[in-house]
Amino acid sequence: MPSWSAQAIRMYIEYMRRSKQAFGDAQNMRKSIHDLYLHPQSFCPPTPGPDITVDRQDVDDWPLYRVSPAPIREKDETEGSRSAMLYVHGGAFCREIDQAHWTFIFSTARNTGLDIFVPIYPLVPRPTATAKQVINALVELCRNIRSIYKHDIVNITGDSAGGCIALATMYQILDDAPELAEKITSIVLISPVLDISFSHPETLRTDKEGRDPWLGVAGLQVITPLWSAGLSTLDTMASPLYGNVARLPPVLLLSGTDDLLNSDARRLSAKFQGKDDGKCIPGSVQLEKFTYIEEPQMIHVYPLLPCWEGGQARSTIEDFIRSHIL
C-alpha cells in the first residue's frame, strides 16, 4: 500500500490541482498551451541552501544554469575536466521547470558532488521547440559545456518529457559526438515519455481505467505533433523507445504502475531483456547495464514528489549515479 504521504499527494493532484482537466481533454489542452504561450511561467530557481551555488550563463540564446554543491571554483589551467550531470526537465514539452525539479536538482548535486547543468530549452508551440532542433542544440550545448566550463557530462538525467529528450539526446550524441559519448557513464530516466504516439493497447487501457490522476492520452496527443514536427512516431529522435539499447551506457529507469507512461517503460525493459518492443514486461529488473525500478501504485514522476517512496527513489538515483562516476 502507498505511504500516507503518497496518498495525500495523489489526492491533491486529483482533487485540488485538477491536472487531469487539461491532460484528459484535447480542447482543454489546446487552451492550456495557448495560455502558457501568452503568459510564460518563470524558470528561475528558488534560493538554494547555503551549501549550493547557482550561476547562469546563456549559451546560444538558451539560459543555462550551473548548480554546484559548493561555492563555484573556476578551473585551474593545470586541472583536467571536471565531471557533471545534464538535467533535462519535464513538463509535457510545454511547461517550464518548477519547484519540484529544482528541489531534486539541489539534492542530487549535494549528494553526488556533481555540478549539474540545467538548460532552459524552448517549449511548444514556439517554432524552435521541435525535437530535431532541441536535441541537436543539446548535443552542441554539451560541446560548449566542455569548452566553456571545462566539464565532461558523465550523466544525463531527465523526467517525463525531459526523459524523452534525455534519451534521444544520448542517441544523437552516439551518432554525432563520439568524443562526448565516451565520457557518459550513466543515464537516469524518471517516468519518461518513450513513444509519442501513446497508442499501445496497455497505455490506452490505463487511460480508460483512469488510474493516472495526472496524464491523459487526449491531451498528450495534442502536444506531441507540435514537438515531433513531421518526424515519424517511430523516429528515435521523437520516440527513443525505438533506439538500439545495446549502444547505451548503463541506464536506471523508474516508473510507477499508476503512471500512464508505465506501459512504455515496461516495453523499454522488455527491449533490454531481449524481447520485442511491443511486449510489456512488468516488474523491477536488474541486469548488467540496466536497472528498472517499478513501484506499485505510484503515479507519474513519483521520484520527484515529497513522499516516502519518492525519497527512496531519490536515494537509489544518487547511489546509481555515484557508482558510475569513474
Image: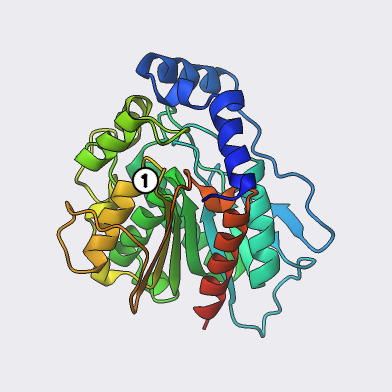
Apparent side of residue 15 relative to residue 201 in the rendered image (left or right) = right
Q: Position of residue 260 (x, y in %)?
A: 37, 40
Residue toward you, 13 or 22: 13
Give SS at disc 1.
loop
Say which residue label 1 marks: 193
Q: Residue at 26%, 35% (x, y): give it.
A: 205
Apparent side of residue 22 relative to residue 2 in the rendered image (left or right) = left
On screen, 12 above or below 139? above
Apparent side of residue 298 relative to residue 175 in the rendered image (left or right) = right
Identify the coloring: rainbow
- Name the kind of residue labelled 1 in the image: Val
Pointer 1 local density, CA inside 10 Å: few below 14, some 14–19, many at least 20: many
On screen, 182 above or below 261? below
**Count of marks, rendered view:** 1
Report whether residue 147 is seen: no
Q: Position of residue 274 (x, y in %)?
A: 18, 68
Apparent side of residue 244 relative to residue 146 in the rendered image (left or right) = left
Residue at the far right in the pictured view: 50
Q: Position of residue 191 (x, y in %)?
A: 43, 50
Residue toward you, 212 or 115: 212
Q: Position of residue 198 (x, y in %)?
A: 27, 37
Q: Residue at 62%, 29% (x, y): give it.
A: 41
Residue toward you, 280 or 5: 5
Q: Residue at 64%, 38% (x, y): give it.
A: 43
On screen, 211 above or below 27? below
Report whether residue 83 is seen: yes
Residue toward you, 228 or 193: 193
Q: Residue at 55%, 61% (x, y): give it.
A: 313
